[in-house]
Amino acid sequence: MDLNALLQKLTAPACVSGSESAIAETAAELLRPFCDTVGIVSGNVCGTLGSRQAGKPHVLLDAHLDQVGFVVTEITPDGFVRVGNVGGLEYRFMPAQRVLLHGRQNIAGVICCIPPHLQSGKKEHVAEVTELAIDTGYSREHLEQLLSVGDSVTFDMPFRTMAGGYVTSPSLDDRCGMAAILCAMEELQGQALPCSLSVLFSTQEELGERGAKIGAYTIAPDIALAVDVTFGDVGEKVGVCGKGPLIGISPSLSRDVSDALIAAADAAQIPWQPEVMAGTTGTNADRFAVTRGGVRAGTVSIPLCHMHTPVEKIRTEDVALTGKLLAAYVRGCASC
């Protein structure tokens, strides 16, 4: 599987939480060759492989569809657009960013900033999202024909390849997790498995794991793995890009699942890193663990730099290794 091409295709749809239909259609198309059934239910993409059998676990592999961004809250009398944030954003880099407003058509815009010539010389104020204004060049009258309050806004930054095996895009969180699952499904294709399998590409993770709640309730798995991103190359207690996926270890996760992931990685000689969390994980695994009567949950995370910015960055090697780890775990999960 050409990972660069796959990541470029997955990051092309600009879909903030609650507006994921375009990426859902793309994801369903990519998943169909590897599953017996694929459908879009309540915004979630759900695929199944194999039938449930007594004595065999049903395993769920999950990654989320949505990305952070904005929602239009007002068009001002002078034609500027006010927004609210959708998900957690870093406001220090907002001024002068290029954005796309997704109305009746895509509209190019820029987030306004004060030129240095007009600044007072005092310490620069970090604007809150409610203070931001987007300039499209249109008058209010023209803009109201194209855009409505409630429409989504995303960063206008293309997918790019970089030196050292890196790629960058605004939505690698969590399209790279989706890519890893697709790689695993390709590797498992045609193999006899000790379990039945579901894939969930879930909505609205950035707004509180909403898609994961309903998806896991409907699927009712025995074991669920949340495949997401974590902080890479920014401090001591994070992952290192290029050294493989991070396996979650936390009181809120199943230690049996964590140990089985570690054993699978070691047996297949897949490099991995520990991600120790003192409480909950901030991923869909938190929802899986308390679904119905409880699900054994684990996390597998891809190290990512510049999270929730227009220039998220990963090494594609880590995506490939994550896919290999997921496949190795599924092959051995009868003993989990």
Image: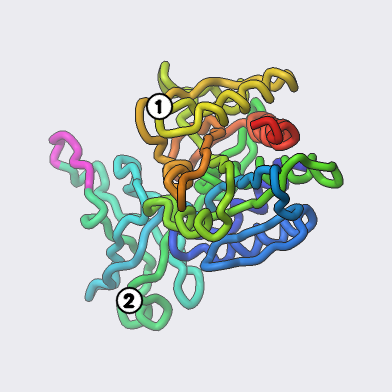
Name the chief secondary structure element in magenta.
loop
Q: Amino acid at mark 1?
A: Met
Closer to the camera in the image, 59 or 212: 59
Residue placed furthest toward the right: 190
Say which residue label 2 marks: 139
**Label of residue 225 in the image:** none
Would you say residue 126 sits in the magenta stretch?
Answer: yes
For the residues marked 1 and 2, what is the alpha-carbon distance in whole angstroms?
50 Å
Examine the rendered structure and indicate whether residue 219 appears above or below residue 143: above
Closer to the camera in the image, 130 or 276: 276
Q: Mark yes or no: residue 161 visible.
A: yes
**Which of the marked residues, 1 or 2, is nearer the chain's N terminus?**
2
Examine the rendered structure and indicate whether residue 138 appears above or below residue 127: below
Viewport quadrant of the C terminus: top right
How packed mark 2 is, by other alpha carbons closer than 10 Å (few <14, some 14-19, many 20 or more), is: some
Q: Which stretch is magenta?
A: 120-127
Question: What's the coloring here?
Answer: rainbow
- Name the mark nearer the viewer: 1 or 2: 1
What x and y, as percent, mark residue 135? Answer: 34, 63
SS state under label 1: loop
What x and y, as percent, mark residue 155? Answer: 45, 53
Say which residue label 1 marks: 277
Q: Is residue 237 left or right of residue 267?
A: left
Q: Amino acid at mark 2?
A: Ser
Examine the rendered structure and indicate whether residue 85 appears above or below residue 302: below
SS state under label 2: loop
Q: Mark yes or no: residue 99 visible.
A: no
